Image: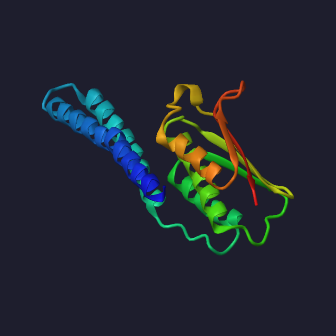
Amino acid sequence: MVQQTLSAERERISQNLHDGVIQNLYGIGLELENTRFLVKEKNKETEVQENLDRVMTHLNSIILEIRLYVHDLRPLRIEKGLLSDVIQERLHFLRRASSLLIDFSIQGEEPEELATQLKEDLLLIINESLTNAIRHARSTKVQIMLIYKAQGMHLSIHDNGIGISTLNKGGFGIASMIERASRIGGTLTIASPPEGGTKVEGFFPY
């Protein structure tokens, strides 16, 4: 099962790199090629500037995409310490790497000895939700709430993007989130509420 998950993760990353980063680089090459010809013509300064502005926008998008991938591939070090601290570290990176506004709140007190597997899978679920919000849902704001209860924790993530109905519900990222929740005995729902965006809600027993 672990080997199958790792293989699927590699396949997902490879596909995303091809469909995202590589295709964007190809598009930038075409844009620069067109700009090269425009530079030789007279009275084309406005078009040249517009082309260069588009290139810079695409380059910034690619830089963000690569930074997200690099951070995703870093090994997790969550055996010790509080889950909330590890989440805050991840959110700090995303706030610096993107323009996404993230509101993170906690209710209750985190148990001292949470299982490492629980912390790891919960962190990866949050990570996948946020990277989906940035990469695919075109979100500008996301609210995260973690509530510690007597028998487990409740997680709520709500962004203001285009909604799950517009995204690929069968994508491996979403399937992986549900699989991780099930593996640690939890439940997870992903839907678009009437007020818009995408909402991820789950409960995870200790």
Vertical position of residue 152 compared to residue 168: above or below:
below
Question: Measured from the top left, where is residue 51 in percent x and y?
Answer: 29, 32
Q: How are the residues colored?
A: rainbow
What residue is at 53 percent from the left and 46 percent from the top? Answer: 176
Q: Quadrant of residue 41?
A: top left
Front residue of 101/22: it is 22
Question: Measured from the top left, where is residue 7 in percent x and y?
Answer: 39, 53
Q: Is residue 142 left or right of residue 97?
A: right
Q: How many numbered marks have been drawn onto this rendered protein structure?
A: 0
Vertical position of residue 120 compared to residue 129: above or below:
below
Question: Measured from the top left, where is residue 59 in percent x and y?
Answer: 35, 45
Q: Is residue 188 left or right of residue 45?
A: right
Residue 58 visible (yes or no): yes
Front residue of 12/31: it is 12
What residue is at 58 percent from the left and 30 percent from the top? Answer: 164
Residue 158 visible (yes or no): no
Front residue of 99/185: it is 185
Q: Quadrant of residue 116?
A: bottom right
Q: Is residue 73 left or right of residue 166?
A: left
Q: Is residue 26 left or right of residue 53?
A: left
| Quadrant (top left/top right/bottom left/bottom right) for the C terminus | bottom right
What residue is at 67 percent from the left and 43 percent from the top? Answer: 188
Query: Residue farthest to the bottom?
Result: 80
Question: Measured from the top left, where is residue 192 in percent x and y?
Answer: 65, 29
Vertical position of residue 8 compared to residue 40: above or below:
below
What residue is at 54 percent from the left and 41 percent from the top? Answer: 174
